[in-house]
Image (cartoon, grey):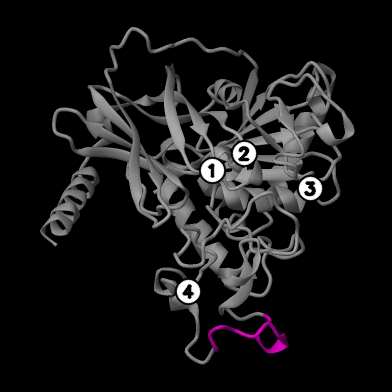
Amino acid sequence: MKYFLTLIFVVFTAVLYAQQVKFDDYFTNQTLRLDYIHAGNSDTAIVYFEQLKKEPFWGGSHVNLVDKFNYGEYKVLVYDVETNGLLYSRCYSTLFHEWQATPEADEINRSFYESVVVPFPKKEIKIVIQERDNRNTFLDIFEMEVSPYNMFIKRDLVYDFETYTLIDNGDPAKKVDIVFLAEGYTLTEVNKYKRDVQKYVNQLFKYEPFKSNKNKFNIHVIVSISEESGTDIPGDSIWKNTILSSNFYTFGTERYLTTQDFKTVRDVAALAPYDQIYILTNTDKYGGGGIYNFYNLCVSDHQAAPAVFVHEFGHGFGGLADEYWTSDVAVDDYYPTDIEPADPNITTMVDFNSKWADMVDANTPVPTPANQQYISTVGVFEGGGYVEKGVFRPQQNCIMRSLSYPFCKVCQRAIQQMIDFYSE
């Protein structure tokens, strides 16, 4: 008990210290990027340091420096070496973590390229990466002290693509900054890419709460040119030479569109300030992908793509879980039913008070029957997180379950809180 109380005191002190941190005292308005290799299998994982880079823009808040949501499976923390005070933290998810839940991870070891970005420091810092264990506790898996004067911090910009701001609502430190990257667009398709970006930006702001908060967003566009048009479709033996090396059939799921070349993604995105990366892929095949505070991908020309675009941004920006269970997925037992998932829009009822219990009317039965009487009610409906039993969602219908619906009220609240966090 004494150790437990001491741990609480240390964590509370660190958070209190961070709340008093003034950005300009510790950071410049630039980015420090730490790249690493994440390797292992379903049971083990190791982080190997790769490189440090200084990038010219910082798109994040200067006020809300410490993550208050704790979504995702990983967390990066920045400490002042001199005082050991917490200066900054952000949570995120990765493709490697998803792969660990696939059958392949039981058979072989694999490695994935990853990186974290933090404000560039004015003095020596310690960067810590933590992973959430199977009991929802964050544990250290990597740490490294970094001096801003380290001569091995790379400072070169790899690319020099055309970059412009489509929506400019002001200081990136007070806005949500989305950067679009082109994937599978050739030099002759630049105008198509620009039209596609405009189309999907218009689509995003048709949905609440984005519609009511449009003035809190900046949209940056990077015209990253590919040698060939399209993307890899391994199931059809189609392979394309594209700038970001995206592909369908991720982990064997045809519609799952991702890229494992995260190094190039970061190198291209470095041309603009950003909080979120959105990769627009030039194809009419159905698919997409979104990983929390990692990246979002969507296709350009499928008829369902506008809704997929918004759905995936729900993952990447809002930390929202999938609420469906009827579609094939590559992962197994992704949400253990004996612990409460971190995602704000699903629950196992282990700690429902930490979710949307305050939004459920006292007269609404829990669990809530999925019938016409409760068609528009915030309740506790069984089915979500890829399983029919044991995981519950807030409303019968939501774009995180079916593309033909808006965000449910619980998802809207979660997104609104995230918008406020970045734009205060």
Q: Earlier in the sequence, mark 3 or mark 1?
A: 1
N-term mark: 4 or 2: 2
Nearer-the-camera pick, 422 or 88 = 88
Give the distance between the C-alpha atoms of the residues marked 1 and 4, in whole angstroms. Answer: 26 Å
Around disc 4, counting alpha carbons within 10 Å, would you say few (fewer than 14), some (14 to 19), or many (20 or more)? many
Nearer the N terminus, badge 4 or badge 3?
3
Tell me where residue 6 sits by quadrant: bottom left
Mark 2 or 1, closer to the camera: 2
**What is the three-letter code of the residue carrying label 3?**
Ala
Cα separation between marks 2 and 1: 8 Å
Who's the residue at 62% across and 54% down the image? 332
* Residue topped by disc 3: 305
Q: Residue at x 53, y 85 (%)?
A: 366
Tell which residue pokes out farthest to the bottom in this image. 363
Left or right of residue 70, residue 303 in this image:
right
Q: Is residue 59 visible?
A: no
Residue at 82% over, 28% down: 230
Left/right placement of residue 360 relative to residue 281 reads left
Judge whether residue 13 can be spotted in this image: yes
> Mark 2 — residue?
107
Task: Name the secondary structure under disc 4.
Answer: loop
User: Is 245 a magenta residue?
Assistant: no
Asked if the residue at tag 2 contacts the one at tag 3, i.e. Cβ–Cβ closer than 8 Å, the answer is: no
Q: Are the residues flagged by discs 3 and 1 in contact, CB closer than 8 Å?
A: no
Amino acid at the residue labelled 2? Glu
The part of the chain drawn in magenta is 365-375
Compare residues 110 and 78 and report the one nearer the observer. Answer: 110
- Residue 56 lies, with reference to residue 320, above or below; the image says above
* Disc 1 target residue: 42
Q: Residue furthest front?
A: 107
Label 4 or label 3, whichever lies nearer to me, is 4
